[in-house]
Image: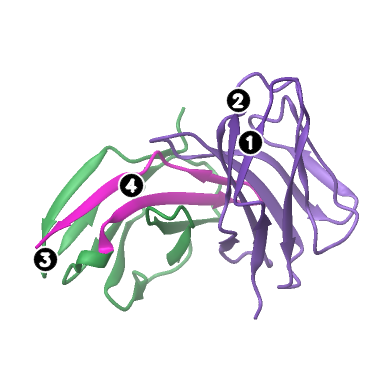
Chain colours: A green, B purple
């Protein structure tokens, strides 16, 4: 079974609008971490936001927030006030106890002027 | 400036050759990772190392080898046994239970 599932291969959003990128995960480990990364066309992976499995509050970092629904095993990324520079691939990832990370297949986001 | 460097940025290999991709970090991170990314795909783990002189196979280790003789360095060798090595290779490091930091990547092409 896939550890991380991203069901949206591509998404479009109007500039200045908000967009939600979906991520569901599968684990039986009670202690885990969830991450979102941005990958521009240059290829480098840029860390955006982190949510721990025991965190009570949803994580926020500037225009990024993580909608963490533990019972549904979902960790959706919300980008508010989209900018043209947000156009990129976005990857959801999970770390279980230990050091291995699992990545989804990514969502390509295009911001339309 | 602290960070992760990978070299070269572009690498071309003839079939049957071994090539080594460099990954160096000055972040004093214990754990280091190598991933492979194919076009339109996510990242797949090749090898990771938690401490010097210790490393574990990831999901796609066949045809690859690594060493970890120094904390700062985690080179990846793509051997001739890897049948389809053309891909984008990313190195990452991590401190404790925090996020991974990634290098800029190496694009390997087999001619």
- Horizontal and vertical percent position of residue A108: 28, 46
- The residue at which mark 3 appears reads as A15
What label does residue A23 carry, if any?
Answer: 4
Q: Residues within 10 Å of mark 4 (few under 14, many from 20)?
A: many
Q: Are marks 3 and 1 in contact (CB under 8 Å)?
A: no
Marks 3 and 4: which is nearer the front?
A: 3
Q: Answer whether residue A89 is magenta in the image.
A: yes
Q: Position of residue B59 (x, y in %)?
A: 63, 31
Location of residue B31 with respect to A58 vertically, above or below:
above
Secondary element at tag 1? strand
Discs 3 and 4 share one subunit: yes
Circle 2 — which element?
loop
Single out the mark in the foreground, 3 or 2.
2
- How far apart marks 2 and 4 lie (CA) works out to 37 Å
Do the CB atoms of the residues marked 2 and 1 lie less than 8 Å apart?
A: yes
Left or right: residue B77 compared with residue A46: right
Chain identity of mark 2: B
The residue shown at (24%, 51%) is A109
Q: Are marks 3 and 4 in contact (CB under 8 Å)?
A: no
Give the residues in magenta.
Answer: A86-113
């Amino acid at each position: 079974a896939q550890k991380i599932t991203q069901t949206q291969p591509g998404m479009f959003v109007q500039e200045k609008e908000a967009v939600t990128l979906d991520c569901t995960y599968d684990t039986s480990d009670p202690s885990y971490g969830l991450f979102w990364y941005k990958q521009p066309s240059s290829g480098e992976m840029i860390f955006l936001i982190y949510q721990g499995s025991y965190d009570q509050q949803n994580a926020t970092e500037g225009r990024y927030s993580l909608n963490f629904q533990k019972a549904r095993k979902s960790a959706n990324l919300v980008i508010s006030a989209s900018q043209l520079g947000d156009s990129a691939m976005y990857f959801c990832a999970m770390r279980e106890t230990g050091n291995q990370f699992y990545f989804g297949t990514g969502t390509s986001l295009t911001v339309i002027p | 400036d602290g960070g992760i460097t990978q070299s070269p940025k572009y690498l071309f290999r003839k079939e049957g050759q071994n090539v080594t991709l460099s990954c160096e970090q000055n972040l004093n991170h214990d754990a280091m990772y190598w991933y492979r990314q194919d076009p339109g795909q996510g990242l797949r783990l090749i090898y990771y190392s938690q401490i010097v002189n210790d490393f574990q196979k990831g999901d796609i280790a066949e045809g690859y080898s690594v060493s970890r003789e120094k904390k700062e360095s985690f080179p990846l060798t793509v051997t001739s046994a890897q049948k389809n090595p053309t891909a984008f290779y990313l190195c990452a490091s991590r401190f404790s239970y925090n996020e991974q930091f990634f290098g800029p990547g190496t694009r390997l092409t087999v001619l």
